[in-house]
Image (cartoon, rainbow, N blue to C red):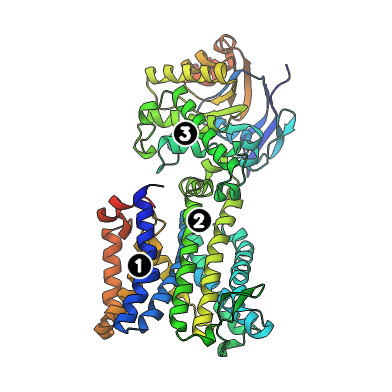
Amino acid sequence: MNIKKVVGTLVFLVVVLAVIPWAIAKSGRWDFYYTLTSVALLSIASAGVWLTFYIGRINIGQGAYALAGGYVAAILVTKVGINFWLTIPLAGLFCAGLSVLIGLPILRLRGVYFAMVTLVLTEVMRLATLALPITNGAKGITSIPLPQELSIFGLTLIPDFGTMANPKLAFYLTAVILMILCYFVLWRIVNSRLGHLCRSLQQNEELSASIGVNTAYLRVIAYSISSFFGGIAGAMFVAISQSIYPSSFQVTDSVNFMLNCFLGGLGYVFGPMLGTLVLYFGWDLLFTTGRYQLLIYSTLLILLILMLPNGILSLGIFNRKNPRS
Amino acid sequence: MNPILVVDGVTKKYGGLTAVNNISFDVTPGEILSVIGPNGAGKSTLFKLISSFVPTTSGQVLFKGERISNLTPHVVARKGVVRTFQETTIFRSMTVRENIVVSHHLRSKASLLGFFLGTSVAREDEKTFGQSADDIIEFLGLQSIGDELASNLPQGHLRALGMAIGLATNPAVLLLDEPFAGMNHDETMHMVTLVKRLRDERNVTVLLVEHDMPAVMKISDRIVVINFGEKIAEGAPAEIQSNEKVIEAYLGSEDDAIGL
């Protein structure tokens, strides 16, 4: 790792963990916490989608896993009474397991066929949560308590969110730390042999098999990590909104997760993070244009993808600082 | 010496069409054996059957006495039988060196999790792969293009890279798919030398499928000739050259000539 990357990482950490909270406190724009927390969580889900892109599959089904993860957390907290913090990994593992079952048959498909099936997946998940008794249908699960205290041997690791003076800041920091962990994992994957093999899959599956790579197994591994990210993002969302409905994550969200990756750059680990930020704020900024919002937004997206097919991070100014990471 | 590879009555039918019909031959360790035949004789199908990219209808392929036909390709590669492809099958957006390093997968001692965590075994592996990749690059004379993106390479180098990828897996038997296709005389001669060195210096048994006759005559210890999906001759290059059936298959029979 070179010195520029270390400095860049440190600057990033200082900005998100200290400068942004300071600026918000200074300006009194507390609503920004909610926005930035959402960006952090959505970028975790997008990171998962990015990993499926990395094995050469277009994934428009991340919304399904975010929804499933959200419901797992909600049910575990309200019906089983488990501490919220434990439900995050459990929701992730549930989604990873589910994605193995779903992935085994569908990951044999390539290109547009895989994309179409995953698109349907989001809708199937929404309908399933509407129909299943445990998810409480269209009424959803509401009044979910705020995250409780997390302690080990009497040592408090995370205080009770209910007693905090400023739970918004706490949620923001939690989401950002979760995001940093996820992107660290993603970065490690991409820069280890696992990532190299994923790249080999993306570029030529037959050749990959001929050098002895168990392609079916590797695809499922990558897809389940991807879904794990979707699951924990969904679970964290539940804690913030204290509710979940079948409509919490829809096809539009799945499409957005994919667009975030496209926009940021499929060749860069931090592409989906930047893409999420730009897309989320872009949409909000266009709010003032009223009924033309969607038209302008879509036109801009089309233009961006036409002119920058490799994403925002492929621009020269980013490349000098951060070549392919 | 026991054969390293046995092709035993292999047949492939596509619906009513028999592409490969009951072909049998043995490959001795350390030899270069070529399968030749006119266009449409079933060479490519036979090649895919041996490398298990296509399942057989009947018959079997044995490697060191173990059945390898109808397994998945990565399992066959794991056992030591590795195929190459024709030129464009490479990892296009990796450099030449990255192509070769990633192809060392079968030699990993560490698990994927080990690589993720960066254990000492994994780091040791990466070091070994890097050194071995440099060896292979030197062996094939690719030093000048090691950091070149694979998609930028000219044809001749692509073929060499394909071979490098195959070599990286440390195969006992290397199956070459038309290694001379589209090459001029000089390139072909260079490739012939390379394949011979592969056998002599790296102890790789080579089975190749090809239709460039002069090259095959130079390179092979033995030749198997197929036509219309059936084996019509087998023997040393000199025997094949004078075999009437082979001449007939390639040039047509005298009867046909009179008919014209």
Give left or right: position of A187 versus A31. Answer: right
Q: Residue B86 — which label?
A: 3
Residue position for label 2 = A110
> Callout 3: helix, strand or loop?
loop
Q: How would you rate the neighbour count of disc 2 (Cα within 10 Å): few for under 14, some for 14-19, many for 20 or more? A: few
The amino acid beneath tag 2 is Arg
Give left or right: position of B56 versus A146. Answer: right
Give me the C-alpha separation between circle 3 and circle 1.
Answer: 51 Å
Residue position for label 1 = A15
Residue A179 locus on image (x, y percent):
46, 67
Q: Determine whether label 3 and label 1 are within 8 Å by CB.
A: no
Camera-nearest label, 3 or 1: 1
Q: Residue at x 30, y 52 (%)?
A: A321
Q: Residue at x 63, y 79 (%)?
A: A83
Query: Which chain hosts label 2?
Result: A
Residue B158 locus on image (x, y percent):
41, 32
The amino acid beneath tag 1 is Val
Residue B40 locus on image (x, y percent):
52, 32
The one of A167 and B224 positioned closer to us in this rendering: A167
Q: Are marks 3 and 2 on the same chain?
A: no
Q: Residue A250 — which label?
A: none
The amino acid beneath tag 3 is Gln
Query: Which chain hosts label 3?
Result: B
> Callout 2: helix, strand or loop?
loop
Upstream in sequence: badge 1 or badge 2: 1
Q: How would you rate the neighbour count of disc 1 (Cα within 10 Å): few for under 14, some for 14-19, many for 20 or more? A: some
Q: Determine whether label 3 and label 2 are within 8 Å by CB.
A: no
Q: Residue at x 58, y 45 (%)?
A: B119
Query: Which chain hosts label 1?
Result: A
Residue A193 locus on image (x, y percent):
52, 45
Q: How would you rate the neighbour count of disc 3 (Cα within 10 Å): few for under 14, some for 14-19, many for 20 or more? A: some
